[in-house]
Amino acid sequence: MRPEGRTPVILKDLLVKNRDAILERWLHLILETYPADTSTLLKQSKDRFLNPVGYTIFKEIEALFDELLEAMNFERLSSSLNNILKIRSVQDFSPSQAIGFTLLLKKAVEEVFGRETQKEQTLEEWLRFYSRIDQMAIKAFDIYMDCREKICEIRVNQARAEREMAFKMMERMNVLKEKT
């Protein structure tokens, strides 16, 4: 319940005001999905040259968060998701773990605000915002699957190329054997 005389705070304004804290918490939660050694390394620097993976994740979650607050342009959203999922699709994550970072935003928001602040906004505002996060997660799954398909294609093509090389080497060996 809202105390009498208080003006309701619009959720978007609250999210914008607490943007940095939410992003820091979201990044922390994402980096905790990595093994301890990797997580420590990724947390050390946001420099794009010293820590390209950490830098990419941080820059792209910034873009994702901003997009969730605005018009939610799926082209820009897809681009940011793609940049993160290219990394996570080659790492030792199950599909749910790879895309689970999107849903960690809900946890980050809840941890930054706590339950009391959430009561000041309407349920409709929260449902709309959480629905956008869910839409982002669904899109992330599609992108993750595309990344995994590309990896599979690369592996198949590499195996074919290696097989072709092996056959050519065997042919050369047979030709040399016949000449002797």
Image (cartoon, grey):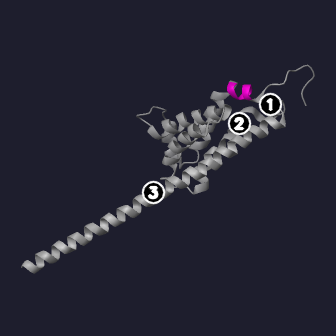
Residue annotated with mark 1: 117
- Ranked by sequence position, the earlier of labels 1 and 3 is 1
Residue 52 position in % (x across, y down): 44, 38
Pointers 3 and 2 in contact (CB under 8 A)?
A: no
Where is residue 163 drawn, in percent x and y? 31, 69
- The type of residue carrying mark 2 is Val
Q: Nearer the viewer, residue 93 or 161?
A: 161
Secondary structure at badge 2 equals helix
Three-letter amino acid code at disc 3? Ile
Which residues, given as a range, are shown in magenta?
12-16
- Determine the CA span between mark 1 and mark 3: 44 Å
**Relative vertical location of residue 162 with respect to residue 9 in this rendering, above or below:** below
Location of residue 135 in the rendering, given as x and y in whole percent from the top left corner: 67, 45
Q: Is residue 91 above or below residue 126?
A: below
Q: Crowdedness of circle 1 by 10 Å Cα count: few (<14), some, many (20+)?
A: few
Q: Is residue 24 left or right of residue 5?
A: left
Residue name at image x 25 percent, y 72 percent: 167
Which circle, 1 or 3, is nearer the viewer? 3
Foreground mark, 3 or 2, reads: 3
Which residue in the protein does label 2 denote? Answer: 109
Mark 3 secondary-structure assignment = helix
Q: What residue is at 58 percent from the left and 33 percent from the top?
A: 62
Mark 2 or mark 1: whose residue is earlier in sequence: 2
Taking 51 as reference, is 9 left or right? right
Q: CA distance from mark 2 to mark 1?
A: 11 Å
